[in-house]
Amino acid sequence: MASKKEMNALVAAASYIVFFLPLYTKEKNTPAVQYHMRQATGLFIVALALQGAISVLGSWGFPAWRVWPVRIVLVWWLVTGVMNALKGQMKELSYIGKYAARLY
């Protein structure tokens, strides 16, 4: 059985994959899980907005290879968030973390 600290880290890391998952666990009230859930929700909102913009640009004939840097940044934020959660660190995601911390 995983310790409480390990379980919190796993739930926090899982929130980056399924941002609402911690709402259904008993770890939802721990500060670290709440923090990473906010960061993951902010990342989800930014990803939706950017992917929407990419879709619109693509329909206007914008070359697809020019949007790959945006997708790479999204994946980088995802990996950074998961790694911070697994290490038990409460670090903001660069550029979007300070805004995500204000969510709910």
Image (cartoon, rainbow, N blue to C red):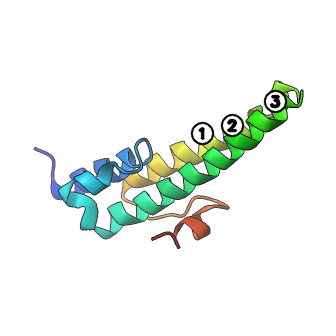
Real-space CA distance between mark 2 and mark 1, rounded to the nearest whole angstrom: 6 Å
Quadrant showing the C terminus = bottom left
Q: Where's residue 31, x and y in %?
A: 33, 70
Q: Quadrant of the N terminus?
A: top left
In front of the other: 15 or 53: 53
Read off the residue under disc 3: 58
Q: Position of residue 53 (x, y in %)?
A: 76, 43
Q: CA distance from mark 3 to mark 1?
A: 20 Å
What SS does tag 2 mark?
helix
Q: Nearer the viewer, residue 67 or 90?
A: 67
Dots 3, 2 in contact, CB < 8 A? no
Kind of residue indicated by mark 2 = Arg
Q: How busy is the neighbourhood of tag 1: few (under 14 within 10 Å), some, or many (20 plus)?
A: few
Say whether residue 26 is left or right of residue 52.
left
Question: According to the image, label 1 marks what residue?
Answer: 75
Q: Are marks 2 and 1 in contact (CB under 8 Å)?
A: yes
Q: Nearer the viewer, mark 3 or mark 2?
A: 3
Whichever of labels 3 and 1 marks the residue nearer the N terminus, that label is 3
Secondary element under disc 3, as helix, strand or loop, is helix
Task: Residue 51: name its quadrant.
Answer: top right
Is residue 9 something that shows in the picture? no
Tell me residue 99's x, y (percent): 60, 68
Q: Earlier in the sequence, mark 3 or mark 2?
A: 3
Q: Report crowding for label 2: few under 14, some 14 to 19, many 20 or more residues within 10 A (C-alpha).
A: some
Instruction: Give the amino acid type for the residue marked by disc 1 in the picture.
Output: Val
Q: Amino acid at mark 3?
A: Gly
